[in-house]
Image: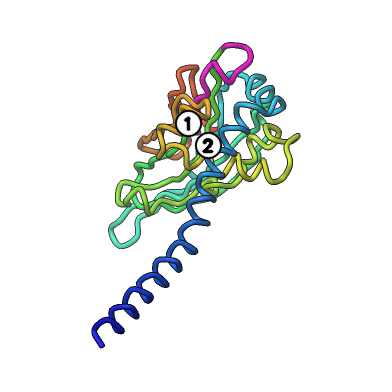
Amino acid sequence: MTGFFGKIGKSFRLIILVGLLAVVAPVVLTLVHTGKAITELLSENKELKQAITNLTEENQIGYAKVLSQQTHDGRLYTHLLFVETDRFDPAKRILEREYDIEGDVVHFDALIVKFDDKIVMAGKERAIYLWRRIYGEQMKPEDGYPIETQGAEPRRYADLCSRLSLHDRTLFWSEIWKLSNDPNRLKDAGVRAIYGNVNYRQLKPGLIYVFRINNMGNLYSEPVPAL
């Protein structure tokens, strides 16, 4: 009897192991394939490399304006307009959103992606900047309000992958958001660094806060009088 049940136990364990492999193996293969695909896309696709090479140094990338500040139940709230501007025409708005933030100190969070000179055919580094979220002093960053949808193609760089297939475009933007958590894939993919840069300041009515990024990839803002 013991031998019989022992055989059943071994068979049962074998069935479980086979079942686990059936579930885990496709996931592992998918991750390996995806990692290989993004590396190949960045290193071998000439059209993408040319598009990255053609990126120009950016300056103004958007601005924020206080629409109103009011106190409710003893707490100050700032109602603001956030605008993302076009890469080629700073006067053109490509994204507009309004937010209500408790307090008057607001954080603007962006993700910066730097490509190394190996992937850039001109031999000079290039960078792209992706807006992430807005949050106030009384909020946790993870509870902030989104600006761009993580993994989606940002409107600001719609031209970057315009000549790629839909599959490759989706792969590029979904993976570029994930690469920051995998240094090894960063290096293999020709990406020098991906990091967050948060600019915060006290906002006042009557001013427009213009966001700029310098050639070192640092995000900052400067106030100008509202017209």
In which quadrant will I find the C terminus? top right
Q: Amino acid at mark 1?
A: Ile
- Which residue is located at x 65 percent, y 24 percent? 49
Percent of width and height locating residue 24 = 45, 59
In which quadrant will I find the N terminus? bottom left
Q: Amino acid at mark 2?
A: Leu
Q: Which residue is mark 1?
A: 112
Q: CA distance from mark 2 to mark 1?
A: 6 Å
Which secondary structure type mostly characterizes the magenta part of the structure?
Answer: loop
Residue 116 in magenta stretch: yes
Question: Relative to residue 207, is residue 137 depicted above or below?
Answer: below
- Which residue is located at x 40 percent, y 66 percent? 17
Label 1: state its secondary structure.
Answer: strand
Front in this rendered view, residue 4 or 178: 4
Q: Residues within 10 Å of mark 1 (few under 14, many from 20)?
A: many
Q: Which residue is mark 2?
A: 130
Front in this rendered view, residue 65 or 164: 164
Question: Which region of the structure is painted magenta?
Answer: 113-123
Callout 2–callout 1 Cβ contact below 8 Å: yes
